[in-house]
Amino acid sequence: MDTDNLPGSAMATGVTDGQKTADAKTGGYASQLKKNKHHLRAVQTMFKSSSSNHLRLSVLADNKALIMISVNSIIISLTIGLVLGKFVKDPKLVYPTVLLIAVNLVTIIYSVLATRPNIPKGTFTREQVEKKTVNLLFFGSFYKMELKDFEYGMREMMNDNEFLYGSLIKDIYWQGRVLGTKFRLLRISYDVFMYGTAVSVIAYIVASLL
């Protein structure tokens, strides 16, 4: 019996083994292409999310530092205005007042350090571009460069996926380093303010009881 003419045969359906193999390869390529697009989208989302989170945390740190600067400046003004005139009548208030002002000043200094910008030299060389060691996504790497030199570096980076993704990784890394420094200085500022204010209040109480 000739099976080539059966309804399910390749001849009856018009599909040969070669066509099946080609369709399988095409389907595998399409699946791989879809997987690659999904991976690329996930990577892009990761970079966007990381940059957005770092930006929000940077704004949060600056706001916290501004609060500490404002609060301690007000305390210093009130202390000088209300207590300074009482030193003649009650000299014992000198020591706790000096202690409180010193605490406020140290707190302000650390808060200012947390918000003080640290700007690099702002230039790069073609050798750095060729070696892919410069981060062109950070303004501190190019703000003193001419437009043509910056454009050259950017085009080289955009034409090289390894260079591009390496720059994105460096950018996120250095954002994290800056954030770490900000929050470390803020932590010191808050600790000095919290413990220093507590000690100053105790010193005022002791001075008033003596």
Image: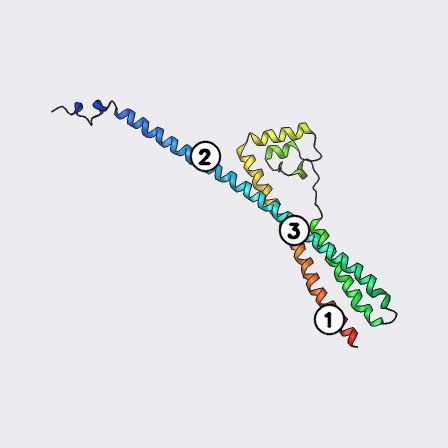
Residue under label 1: 202
Q: Residues within 10 Å of mark 1 (few under 14, many from 20)?
A: few
Position of residue 23 measured from the top left corner of the image (x, y, whole percent): 32, 27
Q: Relative to the observer, which residue lies in front, 51 or 60? A: 60
**Residue 44 makes an appearance in the image:** yes
Mark 2 vs mark 1: give the one in front: 1
Q: Residues within 10 Å of mark 3 (few under 14, many from 20)?
A: many
Q: Relative to the observer, which residue lies in front, 107 or 159? A: 107
- 199 above or below 66? below
Q: Residue furthest left?
A: 1
* Secondary structure found at label 3: helix
Disc with the residue nearer the chain's start (3 vs 1): 3
Residue under label 3: 61
Q: How many marks?
A: 3
- 158 above or below 96? above
Disc with the residue nearer the chain's start (2 vs 1): 2
